[in-house]
Amino acid sequence: MLAERLDAATASFQVGYESPSQFSREYNRLFGAPLLRDITNLRQT
């Protein structure tokens, strides 16, 4: 997502999720933080 500047919806479909909201929920559950926050922090570094 960082290297290709993909949004969450595009990335979620590329890895096999049927909905971006499902991808976001799973990401949050797995990593304990919203995807958008992590992406924003990583892009700033």
Image (tube, grey):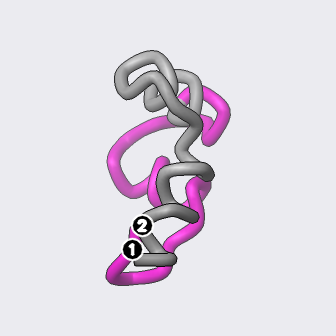
Asked which secondary structure carries label 1, the reply is: loop
Judged left or right of residue 41, residue 20 is right
Q: Which residue is mark 2?
A: 42
Rendered-image quadrant of the N terminus: bottom left
| Vertical arrangement, residue 23 with respect to residue 40, above or below | above
Looking at the image, the residue that sits furthest to the top is: 29
| Vertical arrangement, residue 5 with respect to residue 31, above or below | below
Residue at point 62% right, 41% down? 20
- Residue 11: quadrant of the picture: bottom left
The stretch drawn in magenta includes residue 11: yes
On the image, the x and y values in percent for residue 35 come to 53, 44
The amino acid on which the numbered mark 2 sits, given as a three-letter code, is Leu
Judged left or right of residue 13, residue 34 is right
| Vertical arrangement, residue 37 with respect to residue 21, above or below | below
Residue at point 51% right, 34% down? 23
Q: Which residue is mark 1?
A: 2
Residue at point 42% right, 66% down? 42
The circle drawn on residue 17 is none
Relative to the observer, which residue lies in front, 24 or 43? 43
Query: How many C-alpha atoms fall within 10 Å of the one at disc 2: few (<14), some, or many (≥20)?
Result: few
Looking at the image, the residue that sits furthest to the bottom is: 4
Asked which secondary structure carries label 2, the reply is: helix
Extent of the magenta region: 1-22
On the image, the x and y values in percent for residue 12 come to 48, 48
Asked if marks 2 and 1 touch (Cβ < 8 Å), the reply is yes
The amino acid on which the numbered mark 1 sits, given as a three-letter code, is Leu
